[in-house]
Amino acid sequence: ARTHPLLEPRITELDPAAVPAALRAADLDVALIHEYDFVPAHAEPGLSSRELFTEPLYLAAPEPGALGDHSHSPWIVSPSGTLCRTMAERACEANGFSPRVRHEADDFDTVLALVALGQGVAIIPHLGALDPPAGVTLTRLPAFRRTQVAYRTGAAGHPAIAAVTRALRDAVPADLRSEAGQEP
């Protein structure tokens, strides 16, 4: 908005499942979407996307350890039906177990607070774990979350879409730019 004063950006939080229809209906012009190694995105008719950055995933637990070490631990996961929940379930299944869900929370600060209280373990993306509380150990996993900017096919060249996309790319933290193939 500072560099383009005639643009009036508006933020809307939507369930990720509602984003494609909102973009196609022009209720949204641009959206941030995620995909995980364990939950690849499917192409949506009429929509295009471009990667902004890739970030590592971490096991958040009281002590260091591998994901497979927590087959009997209580888990803190996102609510059922969410992409993040599906990712956690599939990551655990890839390690030979189903998570024993104790808590469901969608806010990473809440999840980390529960881990710090000894209420379970969780999988957290890098940007959700920038300042973990005491009592939380982050162990990097061999998995990633990709954040993309999505828009209607053919709209990438529109000045407003290009300006928002450029502003989003400029806002990517320097430590993640190299992971996404961008120059720091």
Image (spheres, helix red, strand yellow):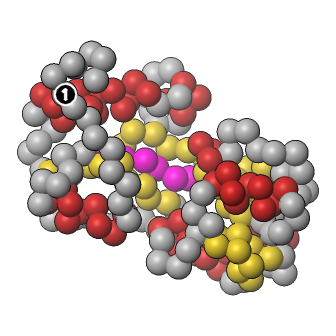
In this picture, is 37 found above or below 49?
below
Q: Is residue 21 magenta?
A: no
In this picture, is 153 found above or below 17?
above
Residue 157 image position (x, y, % from top left): 11, 33
- Give the labeled residue for mark 1: 7
Residue drawn at the location 22% of the way across and 19% of the way down: 4
In this picture, is 160 found above or below 63?
above
Residue 141 makes an appearance in the image: no
Secondary structure found at label 1: loop
Residue drawn at the location 15% of the way across and 65% of the way down: 45
Q: Local crowd at mark 1 within 10 Å, few (<14), some, or many (≥20)?
A: few
Q: Main secondary structure of the magenta part?
A: strand
Residue 168 image position (x, y, % from top left): 36, 32
Residue 83 image position (x, y, % from top left): 47, 68
Q: In the picture, residue 124 is in which quadrant?
A: bottom right
Residue drawn at the location 53% of the way across and 79% of the way down: 80
Q: In the picture, residue 88 is in which quadrant?
A: bottom right
Q: Which residues are magenta?
A: 143-149
* Rendered-image quadrant of the N terminus: top left
Left or right of 50, for residue 138: right
Q: Is residue 145 magenta?
A: yes
Give 99 or 141, whichever is nearer the viewer.
Answer: 99
Give 11 or 18, whichever is nearer the viewer.
Answer: 11
Residue drawn at the location 35% of the way across and 60% of the way down: 14
Left or right of 9, for residue 140: right
Left or right of 125, for residue 183: left
The amino acid on which the numbered mark 1 sits, given as a three-letter code, is Leu
Residue 150 makes an appearance in the image: yes
